[in-house]
Image (spheres, rainbow, N blue to C red):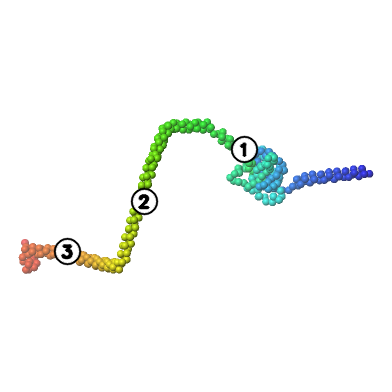
Amino acid sequence: MASARVNFSVGLFMTAGLGLATLAIIWLGMTSFLRKGELFVTYFDESVQGLNVDSPVKYRGVPVGRVQAIRIAPDFHLIEVVILVDDEHADDENRFDDSVASIANVGITGAMFVEIDKRQPFTDGPSPTLGFTPEYPVIASKPSDIRKLFREIDDIATKIQSMDFKGISDQAMGAFTALNTAVTDARIGDISADIRTLLASINAAANPKRLDSLARNMDATIVASRTLMDKASEELTRMDAILAQFQSILETNRPSIDTTMGALATTALKTDAFMTQSQATMMQMQAAIKDLEERLSITAENLEQTSGNLNSLISNVKDQPAQLIFGEPKAPRRIEE
């Protein structure tokens, strides 16, 4: 009896466990199947190794959906990745405008996910050109950081390969040869001998005896300068005393000086008035002389005219004396033929 009860309990436990496991599997499957959201598609022009179905999709680091499908695009060149965006992130149809999708890796595991971010005009390259009509709204794509790194490495390798190392080596050898020639032509030995001669001259000039003589001369010059400064100070003191005496004299005789200065000012004013009056008188005299000159000129003209008339009268009287008594001569008699 106890054995039957134990067997029944074990069978009931196993049946319940299998039922719960079946329900969990069905629930997980139905959850994935019945998941709602909005489908988008993006196209990559590179390998998507490490990206799998159900890989996460993140918008600037925030999970927004999952990868639903990965397949070759209709042009058999690009890789098509279908993205399912969750309901809570799919309300705005234009939320992914001016955004680009790229493939990013998760640490060092090799797993990949899709990263969506805003486009950077100066750093992000152009998105692949589509020659077909997509089934879902398209999110533009850009090369992954790894692809950019390898592309830059290829560009650097190409530039290195294009460099003319032989030409650079030849130019370097030519530069070294020219430098060697310049050094040889510069006659380093002669320059060194000249430098030694200059140093010897400096050492001779720096003889202790000469330095002592220069120091004594400097001391004598300083003493003479001090004496001269003392004399100049004494002369300045005397000048100050003379100026003080002169100022005292001015203060003592200030009334007389003021009276004299007033008289000089009055005299200057009178002189100015006299000069002004003299100038006016001179102008009047000039005007009178000018008027007299004009009158004398008119009188001279009248005298000249009168003299001409007298000469004419004398000439007429000389020729016809009767005119002086009878006036105008009679008209000549008419002669009849």
Q: Amino acid at mark 1?
A: Phe
Q: Is residue 114 left or right of residue 122?
A: right
Residue designated by label 1? 150
Residue 72 is at least partly visible in this image: no
Q: Of discs 3 and 2, which sits in the foreground?
A: 2
| Quadrant location, the N terminus | top right
**First in sequence: mark 3 or mark 1?**
1
Distance from the alpha carbon under mark 3 to that under mark 2: 86 Å
| Quadrant location, the C terminus | bottom left
Density class for disc 2 (Cα within 10 Å; few <14, some 14-19, many ≥20) is few
Q: Is residue 332 left or right of residue 176?
A: left
Q: Which mark is residue 34?
A: none
Density class for disc 1 (Cα within 10 Å; few <14, some 14-19, many ≥20) is few
Residue designated by label 3? 297
Q: Is residue 184 left or right of residue 22?
A: left
Q: Amino acid at mark 2?
A: Arg
Q: Residue at x 11, y 64 (%)?
A: 307
Q: Is residue 213 above or below residue 226?
A: above
Distance from the alpha carbon under mark 2 to that under mark 1: 85 Å
Residue designated by label 2? 226
Q: Of discs 2 and 1, which sits in the foreground?
A: 2
Q: Secondary structure at mark 3?
A: helix
Q: Secondary structure at mark 2?
A: helix
* Residues at discs 3 and 2 in contact (Cβ within 8 Å): no
Residue 218 position within the rendered picture, expressed as x and y whole percent measured from the top left: 37, 46
